[in-house]
Image: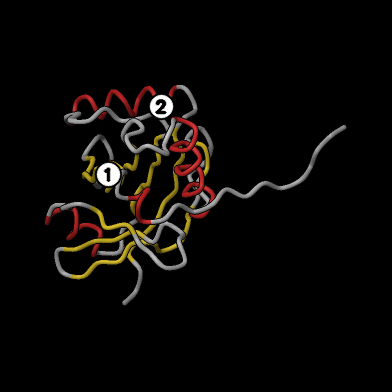
Amino acid sequence: MNDNRLTFRAVPGPGFVAGCKVSTWLDRGTLAEPVAHVLIGHAPPRRAHEDALSVELGLLGMVDAMRLRPAAERVPYVGARLIMRGPYVALDYGHPTFVMRLPAPGQEWRAHVNTGRQVCLTINLNPIPPGAGPDAVEAHLERALATGRAYMGATALRNR
């Protein structure tokens, strides 16, 4: 029997989001203009009620709520989800009450985003090891992209 029922994954609350690892950077690469990035992942399970499956389901709840697509597909525009107030930036990740504060995006990143340019948003399903530096995070993301464990979308700054 073919089961065509839709499944919905819950959007996690602030307790889950507090365990997320977030990185922001400007990729100067080979493009004419830099591209702003936000990478969201999660540390390995750390709380009593967490396991690898519950962490993955929490991340997939965020993926569903923001309408992200597998990284191998065309990157969709998922709406203006960034909120900026001075040095503070938050992401509307789809929860009806809470937003996710992005930890300390640099002034250059904020200025770039504040011009109206889009931001590449990526959720990595693989656990990010604690204390991973930029090189380790980059290698980790490359593995996630290669194995279909990353989801992406383009977002932008929400009008005030």
Reading the chain from its start, which is encountered first: label 1 or label 2?
1
Vertical placement of 23 versus 79: above or below? Answer: above
Question: What residue is drawn where x is 46% and y is 39%?
Answer: 151
Question: What residue is drawn where x is 44% and y is 30%?
Answer: 52
- Real-space Cα separation, disc 1 to disc 2, in angstroms: 15 Å
Q: Which residue is mark 1?
A: 22
Image quadrant in which you'd find residue 140? top left
Q: Position of residue 21 (x, y in %)?
A: 28, 41
Q: Residue furthest bottom?
A: 160
Q: Count up the numbered dots.
A: 2
Left or right: residue 11 versus residue 100 is right
Image quadrant in which you'd find residue 83? bottom left
Q: Amino acid at mark 2?
A: Ala
Q: SS for tag 2?
A: helix
Question: What residue is drawn where x is 54% and y is 52%?
Answer: 10
Left or right: residue 67 versus residue 103 is right
Left or right: residue 106 versus residue 117 is left
